[in-house]
Image (spheres, coloured by chain):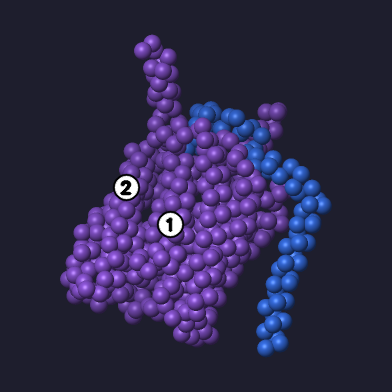
Amino acid sequence: MSTSLLGEHHSLRARVDMSTRDPVLIFFASAVFWLIAGSILALVASVKMHTPGFLVGAEWLTFGRVRPAHLLTVIYGWGSMAGIGVLLWLQARLAKSRLPFPGLLVAGALVWNLALTGGTAQVLIKGGTSVEWLEFPLWVALCFAAVFLVIMMSSMRLLSQRRTKHLYVSQWYLLGAVLWFPFLYLMGNFLIHQGWVRGVASATTNWWFAHNVLGLWFTPIGLASAYYFIPKVIGRPVYSYYLSIIGFWTLAIFYNWAGSHHLIGGPAPAWIVTVGVVGSMMMLIPVITVAMNHHMTLWGNFDALRTSPTLRFTVFGAVSYTLVSVQGSLTSLRVVNETTHFTHYTVAHAHLGVYAFFSMVMFGAMYYIIPRLTGAEWVSAGLIKAHFWFSGIGILLYWVPLSVGGVFQGLAMNNPEIPFLEVVAQTMPYLFGRSAAGILMTLGHLAFAVLCINQFLVRGRNLVGPTLFTSERSLLDDLANEREEAEAPA
Amino acid sequence: MTAYYLVVYGSITLAGASAVAGLVWAWSTGHFSRFEHQATSIFDPEEMGRRDDGFPSSKRAGAKGVIG
């Protein structure tokens, strides 16, 4: 290939990246802010679980307000804003075309932030709607919908002006997310907040919505990201493209049925709950295909996990996707759910999905994307390591004890001879562990925030190589030593 | 009630018909003939086997072979 053609590709890639810079960086900067705010709210709510007198004097800091404020800021602030940033960048890169409407998207990010700030303040000051994941008032939902209209316009324009003849697997997932979520969000808000459905139908709609936020919004963005960055970092195509199409369509067909398994034990018609259980079990098909595909793509390239921050975070997230999905399918079974329902097990499961899978994949994506937009490398590999280990160990310390504690809690609650207060007292060690894990994760987020601030100030501009966990020189030395040891006579 | 059935079953019929039409279109336009090859589309030609997407520093330091 001629030098001029090589340069043309490189410069096209750089031009496309630059066209996304302002909107993507604003979405990312906002996401990092909401990540820290959401982490602080999470810590306050967690401490209140084992020390109810903590910050008891202020009405706006009571558990019933702090907990939904935490959930809303991490879902619509951190998760959604990081997800939108990754979605916009990936779509432009994969279409090999400049991002349309950058000004409108910047304005959209500002509107999203204003609505989120106003909505969160309203939840803290006046209280929310008490509908899980739909605690914001309707005006906030309408603001989000307006921003989504711009994102949809941008995505459709990118689709029509793309320079590629086909759509890569990540584009299928991203288009799915862009089309599914606005419909889901508006339907959930209008049906419930406008009183179009009531009683059992309202609860069914609520869990249809809440579960699909994970499955039809975060999951497609997370998988799109993993399908792009794993092959990209190791320089090898996806193991099986056919498996990827099976994974996508089975997700699209089965996931939206799964939410009603949350109503097991409730007054909902049995067939609705059974449909949810069946949908959840069928989800094993896309999960297994995606897991096989990611694992086989990485096969033989595990060494890259030692060097690349992007790959390490992304693979941690991809493995967690398999884990949380299989756990979710099994939990949907009535025989399991009758023990785990209404316990801390469910909370642990939700964090495994939103944090260990989605958030870790988003961290990985941001470690890749941001330097390409600011033109500066990350200033400290040590801080990236700190972020990874605090977050990784933090979520494992959160998930394992709380899941085990949740099962014990459920078994005790199902025993009528054990008084409820005794069950509450039994959960105390797990709740303290939860707060300790939360502190670890927050420390990781602070390290990430420091890194991002340095990126936005372009402090790594003069570094001469990518910021890796292990420098290339020492990696090569390690490999040479390993080879010598293997070849040495016993 | 008739309107209800028309909307529900009409939607299912339309969705099914569009899925079949999409498959026929994809097959007839050769979409599946080089399907697996599409997995390589995320790499620009100069990236294959070299992994030089270490932008921004790779432009100054040359291809690193390992990217972050």
**Residue A459 or residue A417, whichever sits in front:** A417
In the rendered image, which quarter is residue B21 located in? bottom right
Give the position of the C terminus of chain A as an image quadrant.
Answer: top left
**Residue A245 or residue B37, whichever sits in front:** A245
**Helix or strand or loop: what does disc 2 sit on?**
helix
**Residue A425 or residue A170, whichever sits in front:** A425
Q: CA distance from mark 1 to mark 2?
A: 19 Å
- Count of number-bearing discs: 2
* Any part of residue A447 in sight: no
Residue on which disc 1 sits: A327
- Residue A195 at x, y percent in the picture: 50, 86
Foreground: disc 1 or disc 2: 1
Q: Type of residue at label 1?
A: Gln
* Any part of residue B58 in sight: yes
Q: Type of residue at label 2?
A: Ile
Chain corresponding to blue in the figure: B
Looking at the picture, do discs 1 and 2 lie on one chain? yes
Please report contact status of discs 1 and 2: CB closer than 8 Å, yes or no: no
Residue on which disc 2 sits: A393
Q: Chain of mark 2?
A: A
A283 w.r.t. B48: above or below? below
- Residue A165 at x, y percent in the picture: 73, 48
Considering every residue shown, the one lying at the far top of the view is A489
Crowd around label 2: few <14 · some 14–19 · many ≥20 (10 Å): some
Considering every residue shown, the one lying at the far bottom of the view is B1
